[in-house]
Structures are given as C-alpha cells and as structure tokens.
C-alpha cells in the first residue's frame, strides 16, 4: 500500500526533474499512508510541521478521508483539488496531501517567501498623501487595493500568462463602474498572449496595446495603490502582474500623466497652476533645443536684438557649429543621466561634480560650448521631469525635434508638432480618445483637466472611459 | 463610421473662412476698392452664408448620405459626377492658392530666402498624413488648436490697438470698382463648399445648427475685424503690406523695443495655413473618391501630390504667379463653383421638397 | 527590397525623416549659424555722391566676450543703384547683410532735393526690413552721422534709435518712420514730415576743445574707420577700458567745448557732435520743402491729441500793484476738437482747444513777490497772453506750411471726411489744387484752465 504513495511522490519528483527544493514526507498510520509534497523554496517547513504534520500525527488513530480536512489547523487555506491542478498548487507554494486510503487531493496553503513591505516608490513620491507603494508580491498588491475599496463590486480575475513561467495576471475592476466591453476585450487579449515567460508587467504591455510599435504610451501604469484605485473609480481596468510592482491601467489618456497624485492632496487652485506648469514643461522639454537651433540657423530675424547680440557674442569663438554644439551638450546630459542612474549612490556626488563643474563650467570657459546652449539644453532636460512618466517618449521626441528644428527651421517644428498631435488623435483604443478631454472636448471631463475643480464638484466619473459609444462632443 | 461633432464642424467652418483671407487679400483688395473692401467682404460673406444655408438644409434632409448619393437621385449619376468634379478642381487650386500665400509669407518674413523644397518636405507629409488619418483625427486636432489659434489672432488684433489707428476713409471707391474687386477675388471665397464633400461624416442634430451658425458668424466678424483694423492702421499704405495679420504686429516703435512679437503671428499663420491645407486636400481627396468610386483615398492623395508637383514645377514654376493666376482666370471658374453649383444643389433640394409635399 | 517597401509602408514618417536626414541635416550640421553668416545691420545711411549712391551700414560685429557689449562698425558700399551699393558693402564685409534689426534709416539732406522715394525703393521692397524703421534726415552725410553714433554707442551707450524714439514719442507730431513717410507720400496731400538730426563735424566746432578731447577723438576714429572688420579677442579688453576713460574725459571736456550754439541747444559730444534739437523736415512729393523748428512742431502738435510738453512763456504779467513778472506755463492737459465747416463757400477749419496749464516757473525779476498760490488761477490777462502766444506760434508754423503747400496736419483728410462734396467742389474751383491751405480759414478757440 505504501508503494502507491511512494510511486506518486516519485512521479512528482520526476516531473520536477529532481529539483533540490522539492520536498516530500510520508506518514504511516493505521488506515494507510499519507503523502505530502511541496517546494521548500516556496513554502514554510515550520508551518508544515506545526499546522499539518503534527495535527495529523496527533489524530493518527481517527483519521479518515472525511475528517482529514478538519484535523489540519484552520489558519491555512485548505481545499480539495483535482489531480490536474496538483503541479500548479505545488508551484504556488502549497502542500499537496494525498493518500492511498482516499482519492482526494488536498492542498494546504503554507506559502512563504521573502517579500518587500510596501514602501514609498522612488518614482512618485508625494509631499502629502499616502506613501504606500505596490510591491512585487501580487497578494500584497491585491490587499492594498482591496483595503481601499470596501465593495463587493471589486472584482479580481486571475489569468495565467507565460508558457513556462505561468505568471499570474490579475485583472481588477469595479464591476458597476468599468466598461464591460473593455474588460472582455482585455481578457480576450491576455488569453491570446503567447510568450515563454513574463518577468514584469512591461512584458504584457505590447500585447495589450493596439499599436505596439508606437512610440507613445497607450497603457497607463502606476506604482501607487491610491492612484490605481482612483483610476479604477474612473472606470478603468487595472492589471496586476505577479512579481511586478507596476500595475497597468487601461484605457489610457495623455492627460493622466499630467495629473500627479499630489494634485489630489493639495489645494485645487495650486494643482491647476502646477498642471499648467507641467504642460509648459512638457512643451519646453520637447521643443526648446530644436527651437533654439532653428532660431540660430534660420531665423535670426525673430530674435530680439539684445538676445541676438548675446548669442552672437557667445557663439563667436566656438569650434562647433550650432547643430553640433547642441548635439554635444545633449549627449553630455544623456550620458550623465545614464551614469547617475547606474552609479552607486556614494558616487553620486562625484557625478554631479564632474557633470556640473568640470563639464559644464569648464566647457564654457574653455570655449567649447556656449552658455545659452547649455542653458537651453539643461532647461529641456530638466523640464522633462515635470512629467516623469513620459520621460522615455520625450527624450526620443527631443532628438527628433532637434533634427527637425536644425534642418528645417520653425516650420519643421510646427509641422512636426502637428504631425505628432494628429497621430495622437488617431489613437482611440477602447473608444477612448487619447487627447480627451480636450480633443474632442468632453465638457464633463474638463473638471479634472488642466484646471482642476475641488473634489466636491466632481460629481460623476469621467465619461471618457465609461460609455461604449463614441463620445464626441458630449 | 468615424464622424465629427458639431463643435468640430464649427471649428472647420471657422478655420476655412480664414483661408487666404488674412494675409494677402486685404492688401490686394485695397488696391481696387480701398477701405470699401470691407463692404465688398460683407457682400461676399452673404454668398458664403447662402452656401452654408444650402449645406444645412441638405444635411437636414439627408442626414446620412454622401453628396453623390444625394445628387444621384435628383440629377443622375453622370451629372452628379460632373458637379463633384467641379469641386475637385476647385479644391485642388484652392489648396495650391493657400499654399502659395503661406509660402510667400514664410519666404519673405520667416525664411527670407527661397525655400521651395524645404517647404514641400515640411508641408506635404504632414498634410498627407492628416488626410490618411481621416476627418475624425483632423477634427480633434483642430479642436485642440482652436483656442491657441484664436488667441494668436486676437493677440495680433489687440496689439494693433496700441499704435495710432484712426477710422479708415470709407466710400471712396465707386460701385463698379467694388464689383470688380469682388469678382477678381472671388476665388478666395466659397470656402464652405468643403462641407458638402464630407456631409456624411458630420453628425449634426437639430440643436447643433445654432452652434454651427455662431461659429460661422464669429469667423466672419473676426475676418471683417482684421480687414478694418488693418485698414485703420495702415490707411493709404495698406497696399504695401502683403501679410495683414503679421503686419498688424509691426509698425509700433514701443513694441519693437521690447522684442519681436512676430513669432506669435508666425506660429498662428503656420498652424492656420497647415490646417487649411489639410481641410482642402481632404476635401479634394473625398471628391476624388466620389468621382472615381473604385479608387481608395490613398490613390487620391497620390494623384493630388502628382498634380501639385505638375502644376507647380512644370506649369507655373513660381508661387507669386499662382496668386496672379487666381485673380486673372480662376475668378471665372469660381463663378461656376461658388454660384452655379450651390444653386443647382439648392434646386435639387426644392425639387425634393416639392415631391414630398405632393 | 520588398521588406524595405513594407517597412516604409508601415512607417511612412521614417521615409520623411530619412529625406530630412539626407538632404537637410548635413547642411545644417556644417552651417555656422545665421549670426555668423550675416552681418546684423543696426542702421542704414544713404548718401548720394554725384551720380552714385553710397550706402553706409552700422553693423554689429560679434566678438567673443562675456560682457555682451555691442561693438559696431560702419561699412559702406558705393554703386550706381542702391542694390549695387549694398552688394558692394557685402563684398567689403564678406557677409550677406541682414536688415531685420535695422531700426534707423538716415538720409542725407541733399538727397531730399529730388524725390526721395526713388532712392528708398530698394528698402521698401525688402520685406525683412520692417516699415517701422525710423526714418530721419541729417545735414551732413549719413555716413558721418552713423560713424558718430557708432562711437557714441561705444562711449556713452547712447543709441540713435533711442534718441529718435524719444523724439517721436515726445517731440514730433507723428512717428518719423518709413511707414509714416510713405503714408504721407501716397496721401492726397502728398506731404509728410520726418525727423532731422544735425551732425556737427569736428572742424566746424569751436577750437576751444581741450587736449584730452581731441585725444579721445583720434582713438575712437581709429576704431570705427571704414570697414575695419572684426577685432581680435585680445584687443577687446584694452579697447573697452579705453572706452570707459573716453567717456569720462569727454564728459569733462564737454563743458569746455560747448559753443555758443550748443549753449542754446542740447548736444551730445562724442567723436563729433550730434545735435538733437527736435527739428523736422517737411517733405512734399518726396522733396524737402521746409524746415520746422521745435516751436513750430509744438504749435502744430496742438492739433493732435498727443501729449504736449510745450512750455508757454508770457512776459510782463501785471500783478500786485503793477509789478510785472515773466511766467512760464506747461500744458498738462489737452482736449482738441476739430470741426470743419463751410460758411458762404469758404472752408473753415475750427480748432477748439481745451487746455489745462500749470505754472512752472516765475521770473520775478528781482522784485518782491508774495502770494505764490494765487498764480495758479488764470487771470484774464494770463489767459489772453497765453492765447496770444499760442496763436502767434501757430500762425508762424502755418505760414511755413502754407508757403510750402504741405499739409502735414491732415486738413485735407478732415475736410474730406466730413464735408466731402463741398470740399471737392472747393478744390475744383481753385487754380492750384495743391494750394488749398492758403484758402482755408483757420479759427482757434481756446478755453484755458488751471491744472495742478
């Protein structure tokens, strides 16, 4: 009789290719043999012995297929499972209990692995407001969301993605607020993902986007549960991916990145001012270096005389042409940025010294670069972080606009800009206009646009996301 | 179907009426009819409003059909195609005229040099891309830029008041000169014809008609304001200033001292010009598709680009000549497109009304 | 190949970007920038030497420094037409000229003997030269004036256009710009008015100038002589130092070198002197017909609503037991209403002036004077005297205009606007249609109040 259990264990062990973290126990009682299999790396051995093995040992004489579940301590999730789900349960860190005197398989959750505690994410700190951030563990993330929405309408739907990794992807939305069509559409898309494995939420991004090759972001993301919850309240669907602290939200509009969570925790007048500055920052970041180049190379006539004199004087002795100068400074900044990202923090001071003093100041003094060039490029590079979520997009746009401004002048910049806007206006995923609520103007949603009204005036969720029909001009 | 809203239609109406009226037209109209050009404009705008009225009544009667389907019922397949072909030619030259006017402005004041190839590389891809993206994306872009353009125009007008202006001397031209002036520049008008071509892509309800009309009146008032303020500012030398909107900003000693405000006019005119080109080329492509119903819009764009090149670089060769051409020959053509075609469409409408009554 | 085609079809903008990168970017990368390719012209001077035109360009020469000071020089070119002269100047300079920042155009007085528009035609056709460029005339050659301003700018930081814009704001009745000139030229009255700035050369000055003054002159002369081109970076320090010295010395020597003429009129001394005494030239059909001095201009300014800084001086005002004082009043407030009318076929130009004057000065002539505050009241005598002074001045100015048949005060336009039919009939009855000013009766009605 014992052989059957041993065979089963052997069978599982083979399926796990004799992996070192595979663990099994056998308990022999009067009724027969009970087998336990679990992964040491995913489960807690102490929990196993205290909550499962010891109770069974204590009740060894009375144990039967009917009362086995009652014997195991109740502070763990216990469920009967089908034989096809055994492997999945083991992989999830559960103990699978089986025996030769009953046919059921019982899984007991004793999952335990090291996780990070929720802390303030470095990408989006707030001055006032909640400081919690998502962590890599999906359960914690679910808790963080559930804790904020005490409603039976909050739905979590788990799916598995990745032929090898079988990563959990959890769709979450508020049933009465989210658009059913969007939910269905996303489910459909996720189920069709064919990939070996995903290690971060970014991996499924391109599968969900309508135009995966586009430069522009079509799916929102956030590291903060309060942000995700507020987006869900607007009718969006959130996607939690196990092992990723970034939660995706769909559908996405450009305005979202202009809204920072800070805006909702401060005075709304101040928020409106800040949003305008962010908008301006975005514009400056994209256009400023290209515009400066265009002025230098094509349109000296537009410059006021005093500014022209300053530029002419400072660029007179430079070895570089204006175009090369801007490219050079741009490259310098980009290298410094990359370096400061990857350098250990104790070297940070050294980078700033090298960057600011040696490269900047000495470069100007040595007559390699001009002060206006440094100022304009630095301004653009810093303004970029008024909208940090769009950092990668803006950097690419900066290069494109430097080329356009330098090669074609202001007309090139204007045409390029309108081209980009026109393109953005074609994005209409999930019937949500990308540039809403301004193009098309959705009057109701302007309350949370560049000008923000106080929360008591925001009476209903924005209509940009809720309705399935095209909402032009509503 | 991807349709545009009433507001977006209103903005298209607003933008098209500005087409080639705010740069060269005030100056060349002054040569023929002095400050009385403002009254000439009043007259021609009445015609524009007639076209708009025909459009709105047509839309009321046939909310979902395109122009060809509407015309086919009344005047038959071939005649309807001929009418749409008139539109096609009209929009082709309208695009080219707009392009020329903007080009000459940019050449004189922004680039200060010939920059033909550069302008083509800037304008054509963007305009073509917009047409490919379709009317909905275009409408949204216009909506986004609408307030910016409006702010630019109003800024130019407001700055003009900081310099000495006096009421222009009216009633100096005789009636003949005024009619002559109206006829010569007729091709610069008739902008509302674009609406007919994408009538099926506009979703209008009855309550929106007021909105559309208010946009039209607002645009007309702004154009008339530009004309009168321009004449008030420059008076007798108006004929020397070829870029009305931009010239409203200069001729002020104080402002030149602060710095160049030209950039505002420059950006406004570039954006406006580009949008007008987009609208007209789109209208061309739509009518092309209606005439040659087997070809897609991409062919229409290709044909447009080829025609554009041929007309420019082989037939005319110079942008200034194109502007002359419009005043010399195309005014006869615009008699056909601006008067006869809308009247035919209006007749179809009445015929249908009669039939319904019977 | 098909792959590339598919790729282009998918991302058409990349094709555009490739075209830009291939055809435009290489040029842009090697282009040194407009400020190096073009000479930035700050002022234009036009002279005519016999049959040839000379164009002088006050250009800005970029010098690498951290002080952002302007260093200018005057470059001139000669040719049988203006465009040839410009080309000549470009050859000298080795750069194309950029006229967008030119704020001043100066012409030689002699050029005004013929129709000036033929000489200005080139400038009016350049779209980049904005029409609000200041347009003035000088007595000697325009080149000398520019040379003088060039050294002025270096020494005193005083710009010509600054002077002119002060004039046009405070002194002249209207803007003295190319645009204003053309507006007058093309109007039915064919008359316009432009500013006049006198330039006094060194040798014309009284020879009492001190030694250091002449020293400074020779220094600045060497700096701005003709097409001296660019200065090297090393020179800049020393020259800027000397510039500071120069300005000190010139201000010291200024008092000594003031001639009798200068004592009456304000002048600015640099290498040579520029006299701004608010004079203006009246042009008819592009030719100079008369000169207006500051008093004439001030009295003509009464007809406009422009702020007036005119001082009215009246003498021998009797007060306090036949004591006589001289008094000066300034006009603080002005309301002008002009009416035109025909009485028995005679055109009447009626000017109703509502003036608020303020007492600004009393010359007691050594006599005792008690109650100052009473003088803020306008007595009948003062009223009459002020009216008299103003009328006399206006009559003088009007005589100049009548003699030169130049209507720069808009009489034609006013009549044309309000009494068009009568006025045209009146004009038709005249032997010389241009001589209408002589046949119009001017009526001035005053209402003078104390202000302040």
Image (cartoon, rainbow, N blue to C red):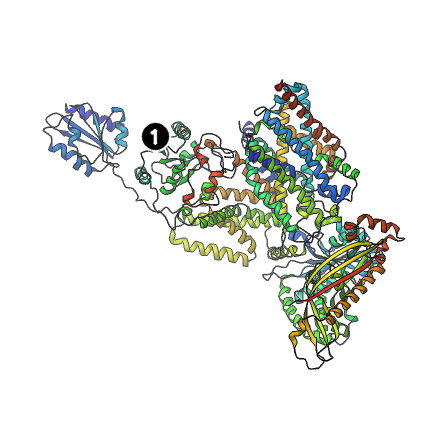
The chain holding disc 1 is A
Q: Quadrant of residue A202?
A: top left
Query: In terms of depth relative to the viewer, which is nearer, B310 or A303?
Result: A303
- When the figure is inspected, residue B250 is found, relative to residue C298, above or below; the finding is above
- When the figure is inspected, residue C397 is found, relative to residue A459, above or below; the finding is below
Q: Position of residue C123 (x, y in %)?
A: 75, 51
The residue located at (40%, 53%) in the rendering is A347
For label 1, the crowd category at 10 Å Cα-Cα, with few meaning under 14, some 14 to 19 and many 20 or more, is: some
Residue extending farthest right: C431
Query: In terms of depth relative to the viewer, which is nearer, A102 or A317?
Result: A102
Which residue in the protein does label 1 denote?
Answer: A159
In the rendered structure, the answer to whether residue C357 lies left or right of residue A99 reads right
Q: In which quarter of the image is residue B3?
A: top right
Query: In terms of depth relative to the viewer, which is nearer, C99 or B275?
Result: B275
Q: Position of residue C318 (x, y in %)?
A: 74, 76
Query: In terms of depth relative to the viewer, which is nearer, B211 or C175?
Result: B211
């Amino acid at each position: 009789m014992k052989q059957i259990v041993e065979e089963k264990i052997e069978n599982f062990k083979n399926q796990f290719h004799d992996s070192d973290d595979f663990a099994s126990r056998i308990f022999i009682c009067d009724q027969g043999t009970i087998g336990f299999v679990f992964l040491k790396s995913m489960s807690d051995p102490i929990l196993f012995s205290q909550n499962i093995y010891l109770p069974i040992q204590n009740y060894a004489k009375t144990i039967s297929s009917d009362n086995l579940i009652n014997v195991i301590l109740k502070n763990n999730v216990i469920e009967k499972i089908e034989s096809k789900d055994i492997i999945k349960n083991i992989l999830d860190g559960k103990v699978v209990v089986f025996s030769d005197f009953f046919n059921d398989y019982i899984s007991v959750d004793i999952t335990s692995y090291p996780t990070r505690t929720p802390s303030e994410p470095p990408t989006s700190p707030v001055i006032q407001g909640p400081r919690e951030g998502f962590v890599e563990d999906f359960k914690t993330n679910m808790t963080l969301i559930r804790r904020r929405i005490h409603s039976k309408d909050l739905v979590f739907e788990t799916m598995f993605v990745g032929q090898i990794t079988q990563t959990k992807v959890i769709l979450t939305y508020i049933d009465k607020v989210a658009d059913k069509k969007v939910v269905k559409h996303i489910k459909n898309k996720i189920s069709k993902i064919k990939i070996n494995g995903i290690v971060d939420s970014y991996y499924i991004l391109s599968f969900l986007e309508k135009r995966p090759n586009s430069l522009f972001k079509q799916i929102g993301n956030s590291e903060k549960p309060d942000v995700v919850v507020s987006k869900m309240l607007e009718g969006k669907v959130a996607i939690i991916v196990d092992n990723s602290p970034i939660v995706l939200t769909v559908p996405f509009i450009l305005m979202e990145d202009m809204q920072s969570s800070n805006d909702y925790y401060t005075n709304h007048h101040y928020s409106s001012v800040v949003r305008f500055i962010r908008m301006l920052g975005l514009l400056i970041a994209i256009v400023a270096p290209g515009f400066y180049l265009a002025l230098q190379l094509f349109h000296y006539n537009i410059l006021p005389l005093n500014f022209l004199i300053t530029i002419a004087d400072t660029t007179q002795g430079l070895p570089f042409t204006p175009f090369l100068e801007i490219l050079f400074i741009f490259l310098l900044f980009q290298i410094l940025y990359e370096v400061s990202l990857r350098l250990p923090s104790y070297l940070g001071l050294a980078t700033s010294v090298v960057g600011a003093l040696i490269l900047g100041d000495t470069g100007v003094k040595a007559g390699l670069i001009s002060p206006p060039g440094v100022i304009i490029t630095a301004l653009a590079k810093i303004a970029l972080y008024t909208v940090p979520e769009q950092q990668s997009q803006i950097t690419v746009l900066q290069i494109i606009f430097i080329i356009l401004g330098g090669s074609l002048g202001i007309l090139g910049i204007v045409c390029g800009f309108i081209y980009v806007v026109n393109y953005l206006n074609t994005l209409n995923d999930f019937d949500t206009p990308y540039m809403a609520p301004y193009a098309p103007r959705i009057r109701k949603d302007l309350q949370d646009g560049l000008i923000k009204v106080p929360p008591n005036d925001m009476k209903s969720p924005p209509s940009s996301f809720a309705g399935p029909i095209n909402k032009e001009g509503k | 179907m991807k349709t545009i809203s009433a507001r977006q239609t209103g903005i298209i109406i607003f933008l098209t009426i500005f087409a080639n009226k705010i740069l060269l037209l005030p100056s060349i109209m002054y040569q023929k009819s002095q400050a009385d050009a403002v009254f000439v404009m009043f007259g021609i705008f009445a015609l524009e409003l007639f076209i708009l009225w025909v459009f709105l009544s047509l839309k009321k009667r046939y909310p979902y059909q395109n122009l060809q389907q509407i015309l086919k019922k009344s005047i038959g397949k071939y005649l309807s195609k001929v009418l749409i072909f008139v539109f096609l030619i009209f929009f082709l030259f309208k695009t080219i005229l707009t392009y020329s006017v903007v080009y000459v402005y940019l050449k004189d004041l922004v680039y200060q040099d010939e920059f033909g190839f550069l302008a083509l590389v800037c304008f054509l891809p963007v305009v073509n891309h917009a047409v490919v993206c379709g009317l909905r994306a275009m409408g949204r872009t216009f909506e986004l830029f609408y307030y910016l353009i409006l702010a630019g125009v109003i800024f130019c007008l407001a700055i003009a008041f900081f310099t000495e202006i006096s009421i222009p001397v009216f009633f100096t031209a005789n009636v003949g000169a005024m009619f002559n002036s109206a006829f010569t520049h007729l091709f610069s008008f008739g902008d509302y014809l674009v609406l007919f071509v994408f009538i099926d892509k506009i979703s209008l309800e009855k309550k929106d008609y007021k909105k559309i009309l208010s946009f039209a009146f607002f645009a007309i008032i702004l154009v008339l304001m530009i004309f009168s303020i321009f004449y008030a500012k420059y008076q007798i030398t108006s004929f020397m200033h070829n870029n009305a909107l931009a010239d409203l900003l200069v001729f002020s000693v104080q402002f030149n001292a602060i710095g160049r405000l030209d950039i505002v006019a420059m950006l406004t005119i570039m954006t406006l010009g580009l949008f007008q080109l987009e609208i007209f080329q789109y209208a061309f492509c739509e009518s092309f598709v209606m005439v040659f119903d087997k070809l897609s819009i991409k062919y229409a764009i290709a044909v447009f680009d080829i025609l554009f090149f041929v007309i420019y670089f082989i037939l005319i060769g110079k942008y200034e000549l194109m502007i002359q051409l419009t005043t010399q020959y195309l005014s006869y053509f615009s008699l056909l497109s601006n008067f006869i075609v809308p009247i035919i469409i209006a007749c179809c409408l009445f015929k249908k009304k009669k039939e319904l009554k019977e | 190949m098909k792959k590339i085609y598919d790729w282009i079809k998918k991302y058409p903008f990349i094709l555009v970007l490739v075209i830009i990168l291939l055809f435009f970017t290489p040029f842009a990368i090697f282009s040194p920038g407009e400020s190096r390719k073009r000479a930035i012209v700050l002022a234009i001077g036009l002279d005519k030497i016999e049959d040839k035109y000379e164009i002088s360009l006050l250009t800005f020469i970029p010098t690498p420094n951290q002080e952002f000071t302007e260093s200018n020089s005057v470059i001139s070119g000669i040719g049988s037409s203006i465009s040839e002269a410009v080309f000549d100047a470009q050859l000298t300079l080795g750069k194309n000229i950029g006229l967008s920042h030119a704020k001043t155009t100066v012409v030689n007085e002699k050029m005004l003997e013929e129709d000036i528009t033929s000489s200005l035609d080139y400038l009016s056709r350049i779209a980049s030269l904005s029409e609000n460029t200041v347009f003035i005339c000088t007595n000697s050659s325009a080149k000398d004036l520019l040379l003088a301003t060039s050294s002025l700018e270096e020494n005193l930081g005083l710009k010509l256009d600054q002077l002119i814009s002060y004039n046009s704001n405070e002194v002249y009745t209207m803007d003295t710009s190319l645009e204003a000139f053309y507006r007058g030229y093309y109007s039915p009255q064919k008359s316009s008015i432009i500013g006049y700035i006198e330039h006094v050369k060194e040798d014309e000055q009284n020879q009492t100038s001190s030694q250091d003054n002449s020293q400074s002159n020779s220094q600045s002369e060497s700096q701005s002589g003709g097409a001296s081109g660019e200065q090297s970076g090393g020179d800049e320090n020393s020259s800027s130092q000397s510039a500071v010295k120069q300005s000190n010395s010139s201000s010291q020597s200024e008092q000594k070198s003031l001639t009798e003429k200068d004592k009456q009129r304000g002048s600015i001394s640099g290498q040579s002197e520029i006299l701004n005494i608010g004079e203006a030239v009246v042009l008819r059909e592009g030719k100079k017909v008369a000169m207006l001095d500051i008093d004439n201009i001030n009295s003509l300014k009464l007809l406009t609503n422009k702020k007036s800084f005119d001082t009215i001086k009246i003498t021998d005002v009797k007060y306090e037991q036949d004591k006589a004082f001289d008094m000066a009043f300034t006009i603080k407030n002005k309301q002008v209403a002009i009416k035109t009318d025909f009485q028995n076929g005679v055109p009447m130009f009626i000017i109703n002036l509502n003036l608020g004057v303020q007492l600004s000065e009393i010359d007691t002539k050594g006599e005792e004077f008690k109650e100052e505050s009473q003088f803020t009241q306008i007595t009948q005598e003062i009223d009459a005297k002020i009216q008299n002074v103003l009328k006399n001045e206006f009559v003088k100015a009007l005589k100049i205009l009548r003699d030169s048949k130049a209507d720069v005060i808009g009489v034609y336009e006013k009549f044309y606007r309000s009494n068009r039919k009568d006025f045209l009939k009146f004009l038709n009855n005249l032997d010389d249609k241009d001589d209408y000013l002589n046949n119009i009766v001017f009526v001035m009605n005053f209402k003078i109040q104390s202000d302040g």
